Amino acid sequence: MRIILGVTGGIAAYKAADLARLLVRDGHEVQAVLTRSAEEFVSAVTFASLTGKKVFSNLFDASAAIEHIDVAQSNDLLVVAPATANILAEFAHGLAGGFLSTLYLAFRGPVILAPAMNTNMWEHEATRENVETLRRRGHTIVETGVGLLACGTFGAGRLAENEAILEAVRRVVNPAVRDLEGETVLITAGPTQEPIDPVRFISNRSSGKMGFALAQAALDRGAKVILVSGPVALDAPRGAEVVRVRTAAEMRAAVFSKLEAATVVIKCAAVADFRVAHPAGRKIKKQGKPVSLELDPVGDILAELGRTRLHPEHPWGSRLLVGFAAETENVIEYARRKLEEKNCDMIVANRVGAKTVGGEDSAFESDTNEVAMVLRGGEVVEVARAPKREIADRILGQVVRLRQRAGVAR
């Protein structure tokens, strides 16, 4: 495929050089277009060397009077990484102030945008509205990462990993087969929060990325998706029915209220194991002495779902149940045990504490993951480290195969 790689002026622009290399390695022809501000961070010579093609930047070069039209018409896909707040605004409002924004207006193929900016800029109402405008046009937005930014703040707005951007490109090049049409997939995602007092709570480090990736992948494969999500800093997948909850009790109520409509249930949420027995009605004041909290166990939603499969008044029929397990040791052994105890069709196990190259926890903080799918009957399918969206497709592929084995493929 012939790809335009737009690079804009953010500190993350240096990552675009490696993205160009990865795209070329995947067999694509890459035409780099740098904004004038991008050239303050990266060199056109670098991209010319990596792609073997001329790099465009200045709309008013004497030799480039109509080249922005030629480039737009002779390529198949536009990828912008990083996409700054400024370029998102130009694209959303149809402003044509430079080579890239003018090219965009003349381009008629699919568009992939990977935003990167300061957290406050990313969360500003103007940026959110621009992003939603671009989503409505059918453009793919590669979600930003959460972490330490160049400005020294911690939060959303970090450029997605190149592997995630590359996966978005691969999905455009080879769209997923719509093998989940007719299915309704109920997915839980994110953490839950159990209050200590009006300002504090017990929770965990789940970001919700895996569950949201599953929701998007299921939508792309033709399913109707019901997403029950705890508190996360992620945009809801367009087209999903989203139920926002906070506590484990709220998540349980939401799951069982939607259960009848579901044909596949995927319990990906990291539900808190304990709750404070007696949450304080007022903020607990710091008094320089230890404070003890009495904790009660939280009900196990996955186990309760598994038990309902055996109840004659709640026939599951061909409905599938998939659970997740996050373990620090004996991952496969514990996953097998959980599969039997919770009466699941499959457990997706990942190792908590395994670090990515960037130092994030692979299970909770990263855009990538590595898992083992443990199936009823003893089969174990290992999936090497990959973007969470790719992991999601592998999980759903296994769901389809389970359907086929049961003789209920649609």
Image: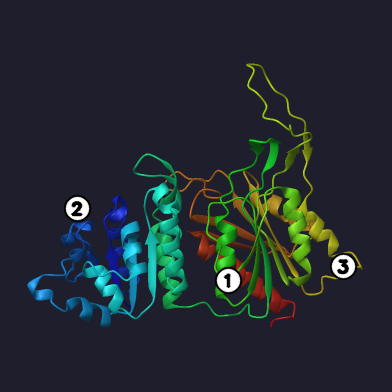
Real-space Cα distance between discs 1 and 3?
29 Å
Residue at disc 2, secondary structure: helix
Question: Does any portion of residue 142 appear in the rendered image?
Answer: no
Can you identify the residue that label 3 sits on? 314
Give neighbour class at mark 3: few <14, some 14-19, many 20+ (Cα, 10 Å): few
User: Where is mark 2, residue-wise?
Assistant: 40
What residue sits right under mark 1 in the picture? 239
Q: Nearer the viewer, mark 3 or mark 2?
A: 2
Q: As displayed, is residue 380 above or below residue 355?
A: below
124 left or right of 406 in image: left
Task: Tell which of 132 and 193 is nearer to you.
Answer: 132
In the depicted structure, whether residue 257 falls above or below residue 245: below
Q: Which mark sits nearer the N-terminus, 3 or 2?
A: 2
The residue located at (61%, 52%) in the rendering is: 190
Q: Nearer the viewer, residue 311 or 248?
A: 248
Q: Quadrant of residue 19?
A: bottom left
Residue density around tag 2, few if under 14, some if 14–19, many if 20 or more, within 10 Å = few
Q: Residues within 10 Å of mark 1 (few under 14, many from 20)?
A: few
Quarter of the view holding residue 382: bottom right
| Foreground residue among 72 and 25 | 72
Image location (x, y in percent) of residue 119 = 42, 48
Question: What element does badge 3 sit on?
Answer: loop
Identify which residue is drawn at 92% across, 68% down.
Answer: 312
Q: Amino acid at mark 1?
A: Gly
- Farthest residue to the right: give it: 312
Front residue of 345 and 264:
264
Return the disc, 1 or 3, that comes first in the chain's sequence.
1
Quadrant occupied by the N terminus:
bottom left
